[in-house]
């Protein structure tokens, strides 16, 4: 076993945001094309037999432009210091790696992976890794910036980063996926680390993938250092140092914010109807925890299609079904519907928990809900936002609503550093305190500044970042 850190992989480079040297759009490296075509960017009408291409990964607009539009609105409103505005409008480091992996048939395939580090003024870079055909520099930049705001909002000492590999993991065997993950980790080398940049799960990645990253990283540090480095990733399996409650943390955080909203609006959770788009980690946990409080799940969509039952769907049963049937589409206790019918379903709450750019100029007028609770990152475009406001539909913005994941990741990181193991009740109580505190801060700022909740959430985040930059000054 190696007793020193790996040399930086020659295909790894740090580049400045403007210097677009290594990253190209499209397939990235121009090598062998992915085995399956990425999802298209058109919403198609579906029949019950033929599911719609429900979620539009939306290469038609830049996600980073969406972030900047949200950022600029808040920065104008709060009169953010001009110099600090310049800093926060840029990412700090953008790493792209092209790396080879041997497939089961003996052929070598080239992959392109990214890690974008947006800002570390408040603490080490922190953010998930996504394995998806839609992953590219623009998407990862946007997701990294959202992580910076999120950590600032819940007041945890982390900055923002995000990463991923442009690929469809369903095309690969578990053994291939393991080799891809390990080779990507090796290619990133010392660009990640427990006190520097800490990955976590996101779309199509999970605790198993975190365990492979952890093991690969630990294999590259001296044996005497290994136990002091297990917090290089969060969202690990519990026995490998993960935290109790991390699997459900994002869904749990969403539910805590909905509980607060219901209190504020005098709405009872008993019989509250809701629908969920995306039934993976975030969507399925949010659904299960909300149903535990008496709410009724009436419609669900995942990559396989959409279903509806106004009498209620059992999320635990659906989750088990989805695992054994590659999705929810043929679930027997509900009707199959298309994407448009899902969005037009009458319900109290809509939880988008799949991908970005779902609530748009086109789709926002269709929603018949009182509240959108954003489980996904970036599900609403600026045009969609304006329509929701006009229609007086409440919105709990992503950077607050889904911050439960990074919050419990912080708890996991702390437990690892201190060699502690917290009970689930302790994790849940601490999470509740963090999320409800953030919810109330944003609610108060929205009211004081007479602005929408997304802008208020940005103001809360940017104020904290502005303070730290003013305290420390700009070197030299
Ligand atoms: P996941 O991979 O566990 O689940 C994704 C779900 O979205 C799956 O049910 C999948 O079928 C569905 N989906 C994918 N493509 C779709 C399509 N074209 N149409 C309809 N559904 C589609 O991912 P996740 O971890 O649950 O993440 C979901 C969202 O939540 C993402 O935006 C992610 O960035 C965000 N998020 C995740 C976490 C976390 O802790 N995992 C934390 C904060 C935010």
Image: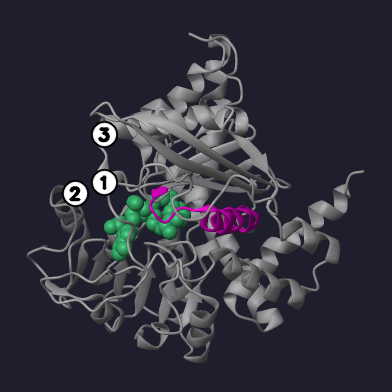
The span shown in magenta is 131-152
Label 2 vs label 3, nearer the camera: 3
Position above or below: 81 against 18:
below
Circle 3 crowding by C-alpha within 10 Å: few under 14, some 14–19, many from 20: few
In the figure, is residue 436 to the left or right of 359? right
Q: Quadrant of residue 58?
A: bottom left
Q: Tell me, for residue 174, which label it has, or none.
A: 3
Q: Earlier in the sequence, mark 1 or mark 2?
A: 1
Helix or strand or loop: what does disc 3 sit on? helix
Q: Quadrant of residue 54?
A: bottom left
Q: Is residue 409 visible?
A: yes
Circle 1 crowding by C-alpha within 10 Å: few under 14, some 14–19, many from 20: few
Circle 2 crowding by C-alpha within 10 Å: few under 14, some 14–19, many from 20: few
Q: Earlier in the sequence, mark 2 or mark 3?
A: 3
Helix or strand or loop: what does disc 2 sit on? helix
The foreground one among 289 and 80 is 80
Helix or strand or loop: what does disc 1 sit on? helix
**Residue located beneath label 1 in the image:** 170
Q: Residue at x 45, y 66 (%)?
A: 59
């Amino acid at each position: 076993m190696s007793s020193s850190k790996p040399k930086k992989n020659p295909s790894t480079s740090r580049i400045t945001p403007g210097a677009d040297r290594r990253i190209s759009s499209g397939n990235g490296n121009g090598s062998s094309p992915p085995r399956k075509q990425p999802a298209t960017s058109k919403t198609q009408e579906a029949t019950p037999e033929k599911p719609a291409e429900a979620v539009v990964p939306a290469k038609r607009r830049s996600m980073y432009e969406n972030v900047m539009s949200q950022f600029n609105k808040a920065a104008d409103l709060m009169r953010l210091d001009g110099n600090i505005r310049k800093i926060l409008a840029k990412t700090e480091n953008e790493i792209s790696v092209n790396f080879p992996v041997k497939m089961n048939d003996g052929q070598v395939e080239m992959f392109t992976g990214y890690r974008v580090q947006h800002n570390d003024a408040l603490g080490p870079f922190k953010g998930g890794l996504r394995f998806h055909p839609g992953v590219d520099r623009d998407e990862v930049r946007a997701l990294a910036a959202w992580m910076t705001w999120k950590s600032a909002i819940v007041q945890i000492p982390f900055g923002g980063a995000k990463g991923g590999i442009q690929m469809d993991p369903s095309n690969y065997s578990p053994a291939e996926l393991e080799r891809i993950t390990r080779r990507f980790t090796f290619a990133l080398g010392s660009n990640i680390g427990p006190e520097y940049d800490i990955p976590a799960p996101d779309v199509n990645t999970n605790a198993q993938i975190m365990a492979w990253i952890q093991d690969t990283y630990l294999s590259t540090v001296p044996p005497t250092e290994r136990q002091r480095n297990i917090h290089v990733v969060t969202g690990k399996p519990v026995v490998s140092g993960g935290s109790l409650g991390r699997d459900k943390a994002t869904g749990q955080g969403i539910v805590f914010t909905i509980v607060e909203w219901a209190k504020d609006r005098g709405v009872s959770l008993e019989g509250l109807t809701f629908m969920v788009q995306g039934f993976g980690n975030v969507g399925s946990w949010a659904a299960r925890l909300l149903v535990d409080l008496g709410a009724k799940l009436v419609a669900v969509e995942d990559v396989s299609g959409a279903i509806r039952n106004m009498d209620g769907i059992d999320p635990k049963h659906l989750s088990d079904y989805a695992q054994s049937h590659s999705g929810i589409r043929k679930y027997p206790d509900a009707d199959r519907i298309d994407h448009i019918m899902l969005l037009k379903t009458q319900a109290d709450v809509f939880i988008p928990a799949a991908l970005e750019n779902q609530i748009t100029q086109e789709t926002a007028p269709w929603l018949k809900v009182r509240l959108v609770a954003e489980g996904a990152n970036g599900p609403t475009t600026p045009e969609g936002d304006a329509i929701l406001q006009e229609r007086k539909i409440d919105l709990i913005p992503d950077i607050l609503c889904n911050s439960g994941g990074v919050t419990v990741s912080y708890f996991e990181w702390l437990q690892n550093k201190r060699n502690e193991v917290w009970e689930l009740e302790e994790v849940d109580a601490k999470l509740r305190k963090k999320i409800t505190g953030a919810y109330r801060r944003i609610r108060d700022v929205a009211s004081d500044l007479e602005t929408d909740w997304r802008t208020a959430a940005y103001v809360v985040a940017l104020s904290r970042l502005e303070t730290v930059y003013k305290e420390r000054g700009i070197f030299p």
